[in-house]
Image: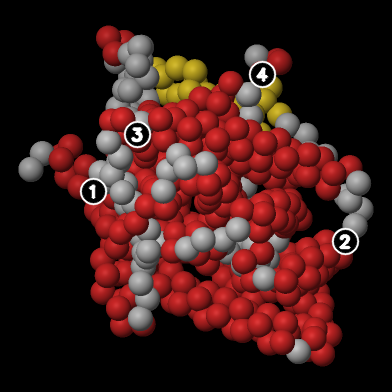
């Protein structure tokens, strides 16, 4: 074996397999237990609401429980603020290097507080916390098993987040697409290797462990058999559903902007405890009317698949769930928005489907395919992830025979949100989070020259493969040999020992940026200069 091949095995292949495998296995086991715990908590919550509906004298007890939960969770939020809000946008911000967090506090905090969210019945899901749990497990794996290689941190966390998504939805290919389309927006061999490994080990862990605890890992058990294949003459159905959900996505995203503005301007000085309490009490009031108004949204999707619910009831549930889900997320209550948003799209498509059945355009046998197309369109429109929408539609929504309809519906929804210029829900949440974190802090722009040290993380890797600190880019690379001094036009040169990197970065935390950079290129004295003085 030559030296280059040995270096490839030591510096890339083995860390990928070991760290990705450990992260995927631990995440898979943890998510199985978490999903079982969540289902038990939701079952207890549903029973408690049923008991209160039968005997209203129990309502004051419910209010006292909610008061205690709101007080305890508000204290936890003060200690671990990064667990607030949706787990997916939080994880994406961490993976992009925009947020710092303590992995162990995050792991414990997200698990405990999200379970309390499910107990109250606040309409937030478990897939966001699952992604955040996987992210925390990824960092913990690096901190425990690879202390001397901190540059692997964001790669392994990416594998963990995708493993968490896979564990929550039982959609491994969609989990892989999450890294490419949502988390980093690029394809890199290193990202692919780590994510593939983590997702593979998560799937293995779930297949082995889930049956032992009686868990069905599928997201929706009743959908696959109810999705009929559409023929060429029925392609107007995905066109219509893509248009309906695309416009609904625009309304939803503008509504989120409106609610965020109200919370920032009108409710900024109200304590977290009061906000959590108000959202929880609203949830209690409507949960007493019907449990369909509250909880993750999984049960209402199953009902829409299995049977008929009056359109005006669906409309009331839609308006309430949309308002409270967005309010809870803006407040910072821990829980995911992926499943609640899917529930909203299913409600909207359910209403649309009922009108088409009433008008004699379609019959009841189209209900499943309409809901599946609506969910796929929602992922494409609200989350701006058309590729993930298509894969998820085929993989998790029973649309293997409807690939073209899913593509059509997803494309229409995505196009409409682009025409109206709305940002994805995750990007909007990330911006609000990072703006809040950087408020009052001074941003500096610096330049520096660094030399790639021997045995550093960067050696043998392409520029495109490296997660440089957030806000940093490489201006140029100077080689030791004059004949190879200029980087090629695609920016894909393999980095070698002794390369001098001219880089520029913008940051509000210069010390952390320096530490992250030196973990990549090797320890050395870093001399920087202000760009304005350069």
4 or 3: mark nearer the eye: 3
Q: Earlier in the sequence, mark 1 or mark 2?
A: 1
Asked which colour scheme the image uses, the reply is secondary structure
**Residue to which mark 4 is pinned:** 531
Q: Earlier in the sequence, mark 3 or mark 2?
A: 3
Q: Residues within 10 Å of mark 1 (few under 14, many from 20)?
A: some
**Residue to which mark 2 is pinned:** 271
* Residue 477 percent coordinates (x, y): 41, 19
Q: CA distance from mark 1 to mark 2?
A: 49 Å
Q: CA distance from mark 3 to mark 2?
A: 53 Å
3 or 2: mark nearer the eye: 3
**Residue to which mark 3 is pinned:** 234
Q: Earlier in the sequence, mark 4 or mark 3?
A: 3
Point 34% across, 56% down: residue: 226
1 or 2: mark nearer the eye: 2
Point 66% across, 64% down: residue: 293
Q: Quadrant of residue 276?
A: bottom right
Element at badge 4?
helix
Element at badge 1?
helix
Q: Residues within 10 Å of mark 2 (few under 14, many from 20)?
A: few
Q: Residues within 10 Å of mark 3 (few under 14, many from 20)?
A: few
**Residue to which mark 1 is pinned:** 13
């Amino acid at each position: 074996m030559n030296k280059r091949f040995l270096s490839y095995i030591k510096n890339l292949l083995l860390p990928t397999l070991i760290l990705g495998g450990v992260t995927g296995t631990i995440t898979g086991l943890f998510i199985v237990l978490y999903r079982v715990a969540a289902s038990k908590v939701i079952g207890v919550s549903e029973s408690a609401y049923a008991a209160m509906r039968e005997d209203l004298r129990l309502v004051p007890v419910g209010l006292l429980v909610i008061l205690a939960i709101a007080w305890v969770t508000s204290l936890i939020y003060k200690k671990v603020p990064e667990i607030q809000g949706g787990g997916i946008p939080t994880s994406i911000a961490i993976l992009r290097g925009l947020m710092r967090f303590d992995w162990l506090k995050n792991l414990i905090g997200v698990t405990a507080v999200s379970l309390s969210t499910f107990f109250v019945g606040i309409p937030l899901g478990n897939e966001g916390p699952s992604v955040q749990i996987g992210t925390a497990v990824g960092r913990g794996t690096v901190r425990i098993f690879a202390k001397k290689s901190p540059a692997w941190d964001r790669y392994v966390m990416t594998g963990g987040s995708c493993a968490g998504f896979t564990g929550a939805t039982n959609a491994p290919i969609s989990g892989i697409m999450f890294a490419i389309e949502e988390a980093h927006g690029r394809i890199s061999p290193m990202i692919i290797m780590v994510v593939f490994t983590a997702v593979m080990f998560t799937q293995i862990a779930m297949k082995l462990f889930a049956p032992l605890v009686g868990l069905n890992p599928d997201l929706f058990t009743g959908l696959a058999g109810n999705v009929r294949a559409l023929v060429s003459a029925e392609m107007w159905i995905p066109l219509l559903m893509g248009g309906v959900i695309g416009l609904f996505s625009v309304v939803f995203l503008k509504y989120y902007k409106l609610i965020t503005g109200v919370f920032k301007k009108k409710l900024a000085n109200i304590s977290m405890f009061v906000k959590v309490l108000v959202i929880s009490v609203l949830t209690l009031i409507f949960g007493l009317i019907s449990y369909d108004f509250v909880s993750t949204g999984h049960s209402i999707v199953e009902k829409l698949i299995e049977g008929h619910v009056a359109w005006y009831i669906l409309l009331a549930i839609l308006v309430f769930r949309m308002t409270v889900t967005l309010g809870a997320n803006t407040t910072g209550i821990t829980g995911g928005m992926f499943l609640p948003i899917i529930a909203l799209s299913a409600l909207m498509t359910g209403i649309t489907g009922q009108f088409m059945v009433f008008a004699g355009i379609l019959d009841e046998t189209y209900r499943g395919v309409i809901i599946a197309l609506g969910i796929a369109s929602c992922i494409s429109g609200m989350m701006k992830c058309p590729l993930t929408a298509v894969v998820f539609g085929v993989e998790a929504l029973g649309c293997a025979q409807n690939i073209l309809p899913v593509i059509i519906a997803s494309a229409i929804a995505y196009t409409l949100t682009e025409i109206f210029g709305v940002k994805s829900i995750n990007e909007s949440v990330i911006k609000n989070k990072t703006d809040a974190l950087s408020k009052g802090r001074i941003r500096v722009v610096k330049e520096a020259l660094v030399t790639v040290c021997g045995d550093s993380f960067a050696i043998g890797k392409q520029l495109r493969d490296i997660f440089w600190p957030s806000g940093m880019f490489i201006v140029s690379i100077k080689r030791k040999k004059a004949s190879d001094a200029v980087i090629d036009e695609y920016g894909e040169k393999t980095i070698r020992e002794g390369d001098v990197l001219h880089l520029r970065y913008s940051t509000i935390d210069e010390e952390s940026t320096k530490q992250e950079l030196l973990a990549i290129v090797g320890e050395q004295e870093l001399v920087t200069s202000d760009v304005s003085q350069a």
